Amino acid sequence: MPLVECVPNFSEGRRQEVIDQILESIKKAGKITLLDSRMDPDHNRAVITFIGEPNECYKAAFAGCIKATELIDMNEHEGEHNRFGSTDVIPFIPVSDYTLEECAKLAQKLGAKIAKDLKIPVYLYGDATENPNRAVLQNYRTKSFQYEQLKEEIATNDDYIPDFGKRQTHETAGAINIGARNFLIAYNIYLDTNDMDIAKAIARNIRHSGGGLRYIQAGAMNIEERGVVQVSMNVTNYTGTPLHRVFDMVKREAERYGVAVTESEIYGMLPLDALLDAAESSLQLNNFDRNQIIEKRIFTEDEQDE
Amino acid sequence: MPLVECVPNFSEGRRQEVIDQILESIKKAGKITLLDSRMDPDHNRAVITFIGEPNECYKAAFAGCIKATELIDMNEHEGEHNRFGSTDVIPFIPVSDYTLEECAKLAQKLGAKIAKDLKIPVYLYGDATENPNRAVLQNYRTKSFQYEQLKEEIATNDDYIPDFGKRQTHETAGAINIGARNFLIAYNIYLDTNDMDIAKAIARNIRHSGGGLRYIQAGAMNIEERGVVQVSMNVTNYTGTPLHRVFDMVKREAERYGVAVTESEIYGMLPLDALLDAAESSLQLNNFDRNQIIEKRIFTEDEQDE
């Protein structure tokens, strides 16, 4: 079953009743599973995480955006987090049987619809845009260039021509960033030592910036309560750099200092495929078809029913 | 989500319309996913495989049994396979979030219901019985003791007192064996040699009967089209003897002859947990909670909905 994650951020982190109404409209509009919803009063921002089939996520995200447009007025919004609009960012993230490219298309489709139906200008980001200046949000949404500045300059500043919609912010909802990105896995490996220098050296060697693995960001962490150190990582693309390759490389680097790996740890959630990659690699299952997994058949049958 | 597999065998392998009606009643009675249905005209027998939540499988199996009782007359049945009744055997097999012991209780519950409602005597087998003489079907259902002999002797032969029901076979449906067993995984490991003696030696050392792993049956196979040999195995309890331990042991034994493992192979289906065991072991994920897998959340939410 094709499955995506959607993590819309809304510019409201103080009025619970507003987020409740947005959540309600999201759940009503699409057959999705809500994974998380959290409000931050300092940032004055809410982050909602849900998963489902792509078209269900699309419908749910659109409904959430309509409700936020109705209830949140950017002219009255204050908070620490940089933002462009009531619905501020909407990323689509592939989970299974769906590619990053397909998520990018889904983001573009939603962007076109929001601009047309709700008259809100849309900026694509992440892997949904081919414009290198737009890929990284932080490069063009800053402390000194957010909703208030965009509202003034959108008609004249050619760096801010929207991907969809007119060169005019919505009178209350501002503008929206819609994008696609890979699932990020937080992955930590514990070493049988308390020597931070060793953890730092390993982190330096395995991360992309240090000549290591392409999709790895890594640092060293001192885990005081255990009296050991940890190599702490973000795997930004687990298809490109699978967990087992990260594990093997850290283990090999640690051996160079005579240090053992005691265990590894996934922090938060991850897609099933990331673990199946590890299983297939360790068992040398070269010709395995994941539809041989019984639980996958239930997905498939459900799909046929619809 | 608790999930079991149920594989009822029916004494009809020639009349397609009979099996179609049984299938129809199974699908109608329970929310199950049909995995397979096959007829064997020589054995004059059909094997139906489906999965679902335990109570759905229970309802579906009961409905199939009612329909088979209606349509199959054992007094007119001929075929090569040993059998006791129209519905001949019903095993329940744990797939996920459900134990073998719970499957045994499900089998006992179904046995009691069938004996009471349909007046068919029931014999428990596998892990559903504590009687060692009944655990292995082949020990008390033989070429020379099947439906015809049971019908004659059930009232007088104390070896055949049913676990549920009267000492009298149903006039057309005979008797039924209902049981519980572990999921069996067919697992093969290919060696980088064509020397059958090496495959035989490894098979001998790793299997239970040879002093090896408790839940492993193993033999050697010559794979002519590839010009290599294979250690061919049944894993009769993948929780007790996980795949990665089998793989590691075969690899180590092969090394003793200077032979490499080229790949391994799962033949047919397997439960997801068997692969997650391998992933957790190879990544040393000692404190992993399988609910961190995104796809598991969809199961959970569906469950809550009901």
Image: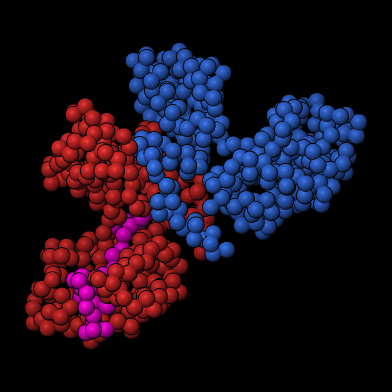
Chain colours: A blue, B red
Residue extending furthest toward the bottom: B171
Identify the residue at image location x=29%, y=46%.
B187
Name the residue located 12 percent from the left edge and 83 percent from the top edge: B152
Residue at 25 percent of width and 71 percent of height: B42
x and y percentages locating residue A168 in the rendered image: 88, 39
Vertical relation: B201 (above or below) A214: below
Q: Left or right? Give the position of B257 relative to A168.
A: left
Residue most extreme to the left:
B157
Per the rendered image, the range of residues in magenta is B73-100
Relative side of A191 to B238, left or right: right
Q: Position of residue B150 (x, y in %)?
A: 14, 79
Is residue A94 one of those drawn in magenta?
no
Q: Is residue A52 left or right of residue A212?
A: right
Q: Is residue B87 inside the magenta stretch?
A: yes
Left or right position of B90 against A205? left
Residue B162 in view of the camera: yes
Residue B58 screen position, x and y as percent = 36, 69
Look at the image and tell me in which quarter the N terminus of chain B lies.
Answer: bottom left
Say which of B7 and B200 sits in front.
Answer: B200
Residue B116, picture quadrant? bottom left
Residue A225 visible here: no
| Residue B142 drawn at (x, y percent) | 13, 69
